[in-house]
Amino acid sequence: SRRWEEDGPGAALQSLNQAYVSALQGAGLVPLLVTPGDAPPEDLSGFGGLLLPGGPDVEPWRYGAEPDPTTDPAPESDALEFSLLERARAQGLPVLGICRGLQLLNVGLGGSLVQDLERHPRQRDPEGGRLARDRTVHGLSLDPGSRLGQVLGTGPMRVNSMHHQGIDRLAPSLAACAWADDGLVEGVELPGDEFCLAVQYHPEELAPSDPRSRALFAAFAEACRAHLSSAPLARAR
């Protein structure tokens, strides 16, 4: 996921885990990283879609809450990604959100977050250490009639878990389509033909060994190609 690292004054670095790049490339896509400090493109007509990856917490003021002591936001990331989401939605781009991406999509469309899911299963062992990022830690139930359910199938499924925040109030325009064993919403989508969905777990980490995770990126890639093929400007190029 995206993260900030400090190495002395003025030396903030932002990176994207290789797992995202590999999953996108494996689906036939060419990822372009847009980082805070970059001017977000006004015109996204040359892009096939928008991936909102994991990363820091969303600023609580964006959903009308005071910050919890556990909340660690990155305002520059929020400014960039909320702007990109707004432009992508306005221009009809497919959107796939992962972890923070689900939270950002929910807030961007009018929902709110629980700032600390104290008892939700996470990627750690009983002694408090961290488990491998591709280790599954809880089950996932899917709505068989949803786009996500159709992409992943609805048989028994287990996923990884690296978040400490999650959906509280679901945005009015979103539909919940996947749930953890404890009832937390872990998948959302916009009903209808538009490809706009998000998951709370990290399929990019599972993709090397999990066909269902690869299927999610394949569906996103298919939507991206369909968007580009239908765009007049893309055809002109």
Image (cartoon, grey):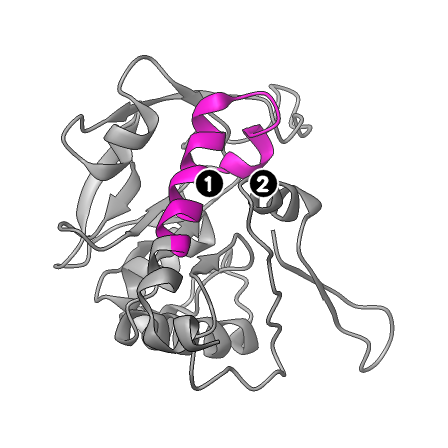
Specify which label sits upstream in the sequence, 1 or 2.
2
Amino acid on which the number 1 mark rests in the picture: Phe
Q: Where is residue 232 in the image (x, y as percent from the top left)?
A: 33, 75
Q: Mark 1 points at which residue?
A: 217
* Residue placed under numbered mark 2 in the picture: 23
In front of the other: 227 or 236: 236
Q: In this figure, what is the number of numbered marks?
A: 2
**x and y percentages locating residue 191 in the rendered image:** 14, 49
Residue 56 drawn in magenta? no
Residue 226 lies, with reference to residue 80, above or below; the image says above
Residue, far top: 156
Q: Do the residues labelled 1 and 2 touch (CB within 8 Å)?
A: yes
Q: Give the range drawn in magenta.
A: 202-225
- Please provide percent x and percent y for residue 15: 70, 60
Local SS, label 2:
helix
- What is the three-letter code of the residue carrying label 2? Ala
Residue under the point 52% across and 76% down: 75
Q: Quadrant of residue 226?
A: bottom left
Q: Marks 1/2: CA distance?
A: 7 Å
Whether residue 181 is situated above or below residue 133 in the rendered picture: above
Q: In this view, does 14 lie above or below 204?
A: below
